[in-house]
Amino acid sequence: MNKPKISVIGAGNVGASAALKLAELELGDIVLVDIVEGMPQGKALDLMQMCPVSGCDVTITGTNGYGETEGSDIVVITSGVPRKPGMSRDDLLLTNTRIVKAVVGEVAKRSPNAILIMVANPLDVMTYVAYKVSGFSKERIMGMAGVLDSARFRTFIAMELGVSVENIHAFVLGGHGDDMVPLARFTTVAGVPITELMSKERIDALVQRTRDGGAEIVKLLKTGSAFYAPAASAVEMVEAILKDKKKILPCCVLATGEYGIKDTFVGLPVKLGRGGVEKIIEINLTSQEREALHLSASHVTELCKRVHELGEL
């Protein structure tokens, strides 16, 4: 039986970290692509030499071209310029649009049946760009954002309450930006809503820290942005798809009327399985939560319009 083929475009910190986790989970054979000569080949060889120690039996190939990606089942696209201190995700709009356009064009030609998972920022807009360039169905295009933002929210709650992160379930919806929507009502610790365990002031503080989660790391690192958690988040999505888990995760997907949002890529709870985005789950939101989600979606729509105005699509 042939193993699934997973291509990771971009062999920088996020891409290499994703390849490492994919290999350890033995989710499939991996192709690591980057434009920097020798870099993906070196990292792939290093990862292959890790496999006997970790006990993972997969093939990892490094390349500067796209030929080896042909026939991929899933493609994780991490290519793009990372944030630096003082930059917002939106500041990367033009540069990363051009990078993502080129990458997706190459990938779509060689793997027309693949599922694409976007990681580059601004995440929601880059997922839209990938959708327009690839021509793939909406079920096969998604962005990694809600999984990461929810993981950050869960981390901060665990730190605050001194409990295991495994006890915490959280949903962060909306765009991957300053107006993301962490839903405290649907966030629980061993089934108990956090609204029963913390004051509103503490919840609000953790919500804000979640929104600032990426910027906090950028400020500390000074020379780049987060990579371990984004990589792990993308891999969780890959695993849910390849293992047909039907897992409910918050992901950036194309809304076509759900939650009153149309033709916009935004973070919503979805069921991930072998078909990709198999269903968008609609939960009952308060008027305030719904308004926040619509505000976040409108910001994404504005950025997508800017991409068109810049003549990139």
Image (cartoon, grey):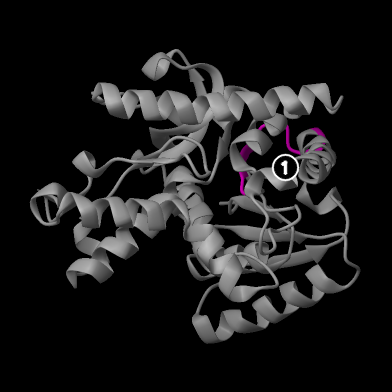
Q: Is residue 15 left or right of residue 239?
A: right
Q: Is residue 162 left or right of residue 67?
A: left
Q: Name the quadrant of the C terminus.
A: top right
Task: Verify whether residue 111 appears in magenta.
Answer: yes
Residue in the foreground of this view, choosing between 247 and 167:
167
Relative height, residue 9 to residue 307 (above, below): below
User: Is residue 26 among the parts visible in the rendering?
Assistant: no
CA neighbours of label 1 inside 10 A, class few (<14), some (14 to 19), many (20+): some
Residue sitting at x 66%, y 77% = 47
Task: Verify whether residue 227 appears in magenta.
Answer: no
Q: Is residue 12 left or right of residue 215?
A: right
Q: The disc labelled 1 sits on which kind of residue? A: Gly
Secondary element at image label 1:
loop
Counting from the top left corner in percent of width and height, residue 210 is at 40, 55
Residue in the foreground of this view, choosing between 75 and 258:
258
Residue sitting at x 18%, y 67% = 161
Q: Is residue 307 left or right of residue 13?
A: right
Residue sitting at x 70%, y 72% = 223
User: The magenta stretch spans which residues?
Assistant: 109-119
Relative height, residue 224 to residue 172 (above, below): below
Counting from the top left corner in percent of width and height, residue 293 is at 40, 28
Residue sitting at x 68%, y 68% = 224
User: Is residue 164 among the parts visible in the rendering?
Assistant: yes
Counting from the top left corner in percent of width and height, residue 54 is at 51, 81
Residue at image mark 1: 71
